[in-house]
Amino acid sequence: MNRHFLGDTAVLLGRSLTHITRSVDTIITTAITPIAMMLLFVYVLGGAIDTGTDSYVNYLLPGILLITIASGIAYTAFRLFLDMKSGIFERFQSMPIARSSVLWAHVLTSLVANLISLVVVVGVALLMGFRTSAGVLAWLAVAGILSLFTLALTWLAVIPGLTAKSVDGASGFSYPLIFLPFISSAFVPTDTMPGPVRAFAEHQPVTAIVNAIRDLFTRQPVDSDIWTALAWCLGILVVTYLSAMAIYRRKIS
């Protein structure tokens, strides 16, 4: 690894974060969709949904947080696509910098921007009545899971960012990810679903992650869900990272 990797990544991260601070509307836009969903489900549909809990917003929030991340990573693909088309990658190649630092700067920018969006969504949830007895360690565990999930999906976003032929193609991949929580335990218990749908819902990553976060928020014993959630996040992260780096090397070779 280039001995200047950390310094190069820090400089390029500063460049990407500057773009974020100049377009705060990006973060606001990212948070609007999940907040609108939360308002809709809590105040319009929540009364008709039986989750076995006293507060539907408490039940709903973990899934909304994952939707927030799925909405935010589309901007990583979008910004990468613009950088590819502008020729800035070619200019970076002519400079003595670590090549992988270019991608890592985009990924870490996504992590920072998504964490800000998550804080905004949690703030709105608190105004809507979300309450938790989770302690500091539980909150740190939730933050760790969400950060790992963000990194995994962001490296997935890098792939269309590098390979898409159009802006719509670069960001459009995120739509299935946004709707994946609807076929999980995020909005309703999976035992209310018909057989084939229930089987899919119970064995896809969102359900394990949502259940783990929900248990941490409610101070329930954390069972195998947290290990399943971590395994999914780490598995997706490793596969997408290796795939994105392989594509990137071919692009710049």
Image (cartoon, grey):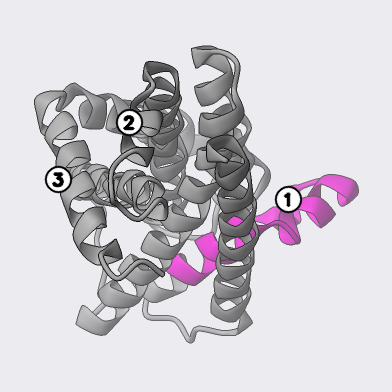
Q: Are marks 1 and 2 in contact (CB under 8 Å)?
A: no
Q: In the rendered image, which residue does mark 1 sit on?
A: 192
Residue 168 in magenta? Answer: no
Q: Residue at x 38, y 36 (%)?
A: 72
Q: Is residue 116 above or below residue 131?
A: above
Horizontal side, residue 125 vs residue 240: left or right:
left
- Measure the alpha-carbon separation of dots 2 and 3: 18 Å
Q: In the rendered image, which residue does mark 3 sit on?
A: 14
Q: Position of residue 101 (x, y in %)?
A: 34, 53
Number of the front mark, 1 or 2? 2
Q: Give amino acid for label 3.
A: Gly
The residue stretch that appears in magenta = 188-213
Q: Is residue 97 above or below residue 229?
A: above
Element type at marker 1? Answer: helix
Whether residue 61 is visible, yes or no, is no
- Measure the alpha-carbon separation of dots 1 and 2: 55 Å
Horizontal side, residue 227 vs residue 114: left or right:
right
